[in-house]
Image (tube, grey):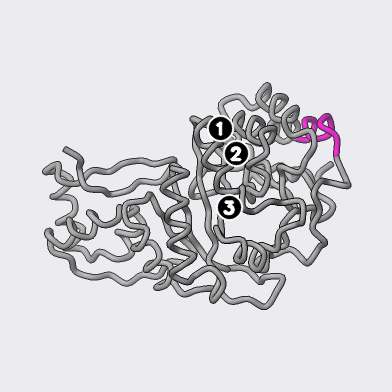
Amino acid sequence: MNNIIFGPIPSRRFGMSLGIDLSPNSKQCNFDCLYCELDYAKTMPKQIEVISVKEIVIAVKNALQNHHNIDVITFTANGEPSLYPHLSELIDEIDKIKGDSKTLILSNGANIYNPCIQQTLSKIDIVKLSLDCVSAKCFKKLDRVDESVDCSKIVSGMIEFRAMHKQQLILETLFVKTLNDNDEEIEKLKHAYYQIKPNRIDIGTIDRPPAYSVRPVTHDTLLNIANKLETLPVTIAHKNKIINKQKFEKNEIITVLSRRPLTLDDVENTFDELSLKYLKDLVKNGKISILNNNGVDFYTITKI
């Protein structure tokens, strides 16, 4: 039972997170992503080893007795958590005992076009879906989808889900060198992001030893991709950031923010001391605003 629960662990995005592993004993996934930190395992359309809702709820109750001030209870897995066949029932049971904590799921999004999955995930406070590719060629090469997955329906499924899920929706894209970092795939992703309308988009690259021989992109590449995504609410994963402080005049700050909102981390890592002063002046004068978007503060041009 103990391996069902992990944490709590601090998350910069979500606070203190108590994790529930819905596949604690083996990898059960409908993707076999090249960058996955777990060893290779044959993809599957559904879980073969299934733990009971009762067992999970007991483990969560015990953990909540020992750990207080939990911000999020996170559904995840050694694989894909939405493959857990009793997820809807489990969410209902966790809602009864979660108190002030929010629920969060970290999903690869492969099943999001399934109406039953859409209804189930809509009951979760924060839904984070992966979207590494849009083209079928990229999906099959990078995410290595199970034959049960119709990758052509994933983006449309996310659009449908966004229309019914009024709470937080976050997309995550992990860029891998030579696989999804080309202009064509980035443009497809950009178009999909605009259609899906997530609250936030997290982009990053490989930072742990992958199961296969693939390489990360550079921080500069991530920054260039973020700039191409223009006004979308994009944040670059903190662990991939480098510090390179520069001087910006007030007009330059306005120009930068008119192209893309910047997070507090972006500013702290790229603005020198005088530039930070200019930024504070612009905020004080009302030309720039600070908007909190699902736990992340963005500097953005004030809308009239």
Q: Is residue 52 magenta?
A: yes
The label on residue 243 is: none
First reached walking from the N terminus: tag 3 or tag 1: 1
Image quadrant of residue 128?
top right
Label 3 crowd (10 A; few <14 / some 14-19 / many >=20): some
Residue 292: x and y in percent read: 36, 41
Horizontal placement of 76 versus 273: left or right? right
Q: Secondary structure at mark 3?
A: strand
| Amino acid beneath label 3 | Ser
Residue 150 screen position, x and y as percent: 68, 51
* Residue in front for this viewpoint, 51 or 71: 51
Asked whether the residues under the numbered discs 2 and 1 touch, taking CB atoms below 8 Å apart as contact, a structural biologist would say: yes
x 63%, y 34%: residue: 118
- Of circles 3 and 1, the one toward us is 3
The answer to whether marks 2 and 3 mark residues whose Cβ atoms lie closer than 8 Å is no
Q: Amino acid at mark 1?
A: Asp
Q: Which residues lie in the magenta part?
A: 51-59
The reply to whether the magenta stretch includes residue 98 is: no
Main SS, magenta region, reads helix
Please report the residue visible at 56 percent of the width from the left and 36 percent of the height from the top: 161
The answer for how far apart the CA atoms under marks 2 and 1 are is 6 Å
Name the residue tied to disc 3. Answer: 130
Quarter of the figure with the N terminus: top right
Q: Which residue is mark 2?
A: 104
Q: Is residue 256 left or right of residue 38?
A: left
Name which residue lies at 53% across and 58% down.
Answer: 173
